[in-house]
Amino acid sequence: MRGARLGVVALGLLAVPLLSSCTGGMLDPQSPRADKVIVLWWVMLGTSSVIFVFLCGLLLWGLRRASRNSARAREGQLNRDRYLVLGGGIALPVTVMVVLMVLTVWAGRSITEAAGSDAVTVEVIGHQWWWEVRYPDTGLVTANEIHIPSGEPVNILLKSEDVIHSFWVPELSGKIDLIPGRTNSLIIEASHPGEFRGQCAEFCGLQHAGMRILVVAEDRDSFDQWVQEQGEPAPALNPADDAQLWEGQQAFLGSACVYCHTIRGTNGSGTLGPDLTHIASRQRLASNMIPNTRGHLAGWILDPQAVKPGTQMPPTQLSADQLDALLDYLESLK
């Protein structure tokens, strides 16, 4: 009866990854490189499951034999037991480990190998707790959202400005650490257009779980158009024609925001926080924790600690009129 219960528990544990694959994520790869990672994962799961079941059976068999055999009969089994120990305790584990090591190296090389010289390069810099995203070939700077052309390998260069982080977009590739003072590289490639969510996978402080990233894969024409639009500075404003937006811009330049954020085309050139030049074009705020809507943006500006406790963004003191004008201005930055 106890053995049957153990069997049910084991089958339940094995069913968890099978059920989770229906909801996307690591077990639903959308990239040639992620396919290789999942092959390795299934091989490891299958191998460990077979070994676990085999050892459980061997243990039960040994206990049963020990209770039935006499001392003389046990002495007659010594030679065969030695072969069992040499084969099952040395030869089999060494063989399994060598095979898994070869597969691991094969999968690891596919993740880190460089793409072609004409591939898009994206520099991702980890901060507590947000992602700075740069396109060095064009000078484009954004945050928490990476756009890539689908069907093409993309070079990702990974750095950290403070502590160790880890970049992981499960559907597109394996994970790799961002280490201060070092640049690591990764290749991601989306097989088709779509949105793929990622996460910092190395504990990096209070808001580690809130350090999320979004990868948007789109066809090449749409990607080129996005790059062109994102490379433009914020539009120049005329107080006579755009009084409300002008007041919003002045609210930004006259507040503490200007010391941490950049809006290209203005005097705002802070580098401690994300570049806001095209903040209205992003889908989410606070490292993808909340939707990019007017209400959420207002709450994030006035009381960021209520949204993301521990964040390094301080609250901003604004009057109702200043806040309303600032929101109008930020929503115009598309």
Image (cartoon, rainbow, N blue to C red):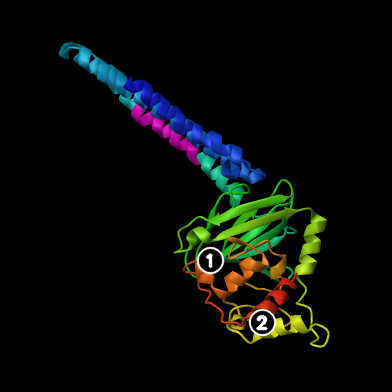
Dominant secondary structure (helix, strand or loop) of the stretch shown in magenta:
helix
From which residue to which does the magenta span run? 87-101
Task: Decide which of tag 2 and tag 1 comes sooner along the chain.
Answer: 1
Does the rendering let one see residue 169?
Answer: yes
**Circle 1 sits on which residue?**
307
Residue found at the very far left of the displayed protein: 71
Task: Tell which of 266 and 123 is nearer to you.
Answer: 266
- Mark on residue 196? none
Image marks 2 and 1: residues in contact by CB distance under 8 Å: no
Asked if the stretch drawn in magenta spans residue 69, the answer is no
Residue drawn 75% across the image and 77% down it? 234
Specify the label residue 321 is tagged with: 2
Q: Kindly give the residue lying farthest to the front in the view shown.
A: 320
Circle 1 sits in a helix, a strand or a loop, which is it? helix
Q: In which quarter of the image is residue 142?
A: bottom right
Q: Residue at point 62% right, 63% down?
A: 144
- The residue lying toward the viewer, choosing from 221 and 179, is 221
Q: Callout 2 environment at 10 Å: few (<14), some (14 to 19), or many (20+)?
A: few
Where is residue 128 shown, x and y percent of the image? 51, 68
- Three-letter code, disc 2: Asp
Quarter of the rendering occupied by the C terminus: bottom right
Image-quadrant location for residue 76: top left
Q: Is residue 173 above or below residue 320?
A: above
Secondary element at image label 2: helix
- Specify whether residue 91 is painted magenta: yes
The residue drawn where x is 70% and y is 59% is 147
Residue 263 seen? no
